[in-house]
Image (cartoon, grey):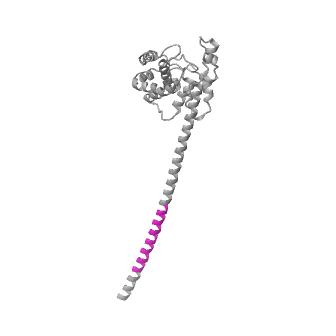
Amino acid sequence: MSGIGSTMMSEELEQLREELARLRAALALREREADERARELQRYSDQLRRASELEHTRAQELRRSYDATVRALADAVEARDAYTGKHAERVAAYGLALARECGMCVEEPQIEFGFLLHDIGKVAISDAILHKPGTLTVPERDLMRRHPVIGDEIVSGIEFLSEARHVVRSHHERWDGTGYPDRLAGEKIPLAARVFAVADTFDALTSDRPYRAAASFATARDVIAQEAGTQFDPDVAQTFLSLPDEALEQIRLTLL
């Protein structure tokens, strides 16, 4: 019995050894498979990283291309009026500072593009009307007042200017509903256009014109305060009045 028992124990031990060997082999296989999956995942990760970097580079290049195109268009509009200088760039800078304080997202370029291209519709207005020294006739005034609609038509269908259209079309609307072209009132006017209206008036008042000298910042602030609730969104006007002179002066000096 002892011999038989010893033989059985040896057989069981051998079976255990064989089972252990199989488990070790299976474990080694699983480890190799895990290593291969890890290497494969790393390859995928590297490919995604490279693709992301390439996409980021392309996006930056596209943004630069859009920016250059918009600025060239804005320069073409302003080239027709020797007295505006860098008006569009100053208004865009004032407007972005104000938009930021109003809680708007200014990281995307759409708002800035709208500010820069606000008067693009004037490319369709004749020089005789644009530069007429006297008072416009009623037909001439009506044609001039079509420039926001013309501008909207120009930028419509351009995907990267889809949000900029709000400023292009509505920058002459007034809070009290007496503006043009759509006679929008209050919050029906897009916020970006309400912001622009304040920035535009500030720059117009504080810039030299052939018929008058530039007003002081204090005078321009008084005008904006007086027009809050009629021409301007009162909340936007109040936010603008809270901007320090130093910040506005830095913009003006940079873009003289």
The image shows residue 23 at horizontal and vertical percentages of: 44, 71
Q: Is residue 27 magenta?
A: yes
Provide the residue span drawn in magenta. 13-37
Location of residue 1 with respect to 243 vertically, above or below: below
Picture residue at 58% right of the left edge, 31% below the top: 72
Location of residue 17 with respect to 50 vertically, above or below: below
**Residue 180 found in image quarter:** top right
Picture residue at 42% right of the left edge, 74% below the top: 20
Q: Is residue 191 visible?
A: no
Location of the N terminus (image quadrant): bottom left
Q: Is residue 203 visible?
A: yes
Closer to us: 229 or 140: 140
**Residue 170 found in image quarter:** top right
Location of residue 141 with respect to 78 vertically, above or below: above
The image shows residue 204 at horizontal and vertical percentages of: 50, 19
Picture residue at 57% right of the left edge, 32% below the top: 70
The image shows residue 243 at horizontal and vertical percentages of: 40, 24
Picture residue at 53% right of the left edge, 32% below the top: 110
The image shows residue 232 at horizontal and vertical percentages of: 48, 19
Tally of numbered discs: 0
Closer to us: 196 or 184: 196
What secondary structure is the magenta-colored segment mainly? Answer: helix
**Would residue 246 be found to the left or right of residue 78 on screen?**
left
Q: Is residue 108 magenta?
A: no
